[in-house]
Image: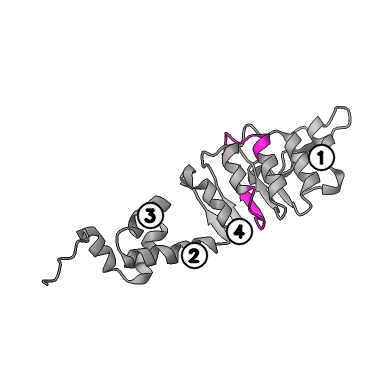
């Protein structure tokens, strides 16, 4: 019979005109929902989406400043992921249950995650045995008690940050005291006549100064 006209929409045809490298770059900036729609369009796009998914599953570093919250459960599939940056992503404790299933995760940045609480951090501490860096700056609902728990339960943990980097260090005040501020939120003053603060007293001495 007569050849059937191509039924692909014009936008799909334009996509198929792209080189494989450009198509992969385009798909890298799409959501998983977009991938699903593309995969249903034709065999060529289905193959490209499959390739992109394989790259995603083998990723070792991920920065998701605009992570759709529905994708959080998919993180469990990224078993090789070592670094995950979720700065200012509006996630809560429920979303961290997926992060807690990443066995090789060594760095987690939750800076500005205002809805994360002590319970969410406890999920990460319990489920990420390889964690080395944990960033909790501006996590308003996370208290120092969970910092102490993380230090006890995570043998590889070398940095737990609860304040901006510019605040770290020892500073000489105009009245002659030395004030030392640590990344985890602990502090120490050189004065001998007043308490140095509960947080500093609780900080393990083995961590030493900066």
Would you say the residues marked 3 and 1 are in contact, meaning their CB atoms lie under 8 Å apart?
no
Q: Quadrant of the N terminus?
A: bottom left
Q: Position of residue 103 (x, y in %)?
A: 67, 55
User: Where is mark 3, residue-wise?
Assistant: 36
Say the numbered circle drawn on residue 203. Answer: 1
Give the SS element for disc 1: loop
Over which residues does the magenta segment extend?
100-120
Q: Earlier in the sequence, mark 2 or mark 1?
A: 2
Q: Is residue 95 left or right of residue 70?
A: right
Asked where in the image residue 117 lies, by quadrant, the reply is top right
Of residues 15 and 42, the one nearer the viewer is 42
Q: Earlier in the sequence, mark 1 or mark 4?
A: 4
User: Where is mark 2, residue-wise?
Assistant: 55
User: Among all residues in the image, which is located at the extreme front?
Assistant: 1
Give the CA separation, mark 3 to mark 4: 22 Å
Q: Which residue sits at x=85%, y=28%?
A: 195
Q: Is residue 8 left or right of residue 27?
A: left
Instruction: Assign the magenta stretch its main secondary structure.
Output: loop
Q: Which residue sits at x=51%, y=38%?
A: 90
Q: Earlier in the sequence, mark 3 or mark 4?
A: 3
């Amino acid at each position: 019979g007569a050849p059937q006209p191509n039924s692909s929409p014009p936008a799909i045809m334009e996509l198929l005109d792209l080189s494989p490298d450009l198509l992969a770059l385009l798909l890298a900036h799409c959501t998983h929902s977009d991938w699903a729609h593309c995969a249903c369009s034709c065999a060529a796009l289905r193959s490209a989406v499959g390739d992109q998914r394989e790259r995603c599953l083998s990723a070792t570093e991920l920065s998701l400043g605009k992570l759709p919250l529905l994708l959080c459960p998919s993180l469990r599939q990224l078993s090789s992921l070592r670094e995950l940056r979720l700065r200012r992503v509006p996630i809560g404790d429920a979303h961290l249950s997926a992060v807690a299933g990443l066995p090789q995760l060594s760095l987690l940045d939750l800076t500005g995650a205002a809805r994360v609480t002590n319970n969410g951090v406890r999920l990460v501490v319990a489920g990420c045995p390889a964690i080395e860096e944990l960033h909790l700056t501006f996590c308003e609902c996370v208290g120092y008690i969970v910092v102490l728990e993380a230090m006890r339960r995570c043998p590889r943990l070398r940095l737990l940050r609860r304040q901006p980097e510019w605040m770290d260090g020892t500073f000489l005040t105009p009245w002659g005291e030395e004030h030392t501020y640590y990344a985890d939120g602990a502090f120490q003053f050189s004065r001998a006549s007043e308490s140095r603060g509960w947080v500093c007293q609780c900080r393990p001495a083995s961590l030493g100064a900066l």
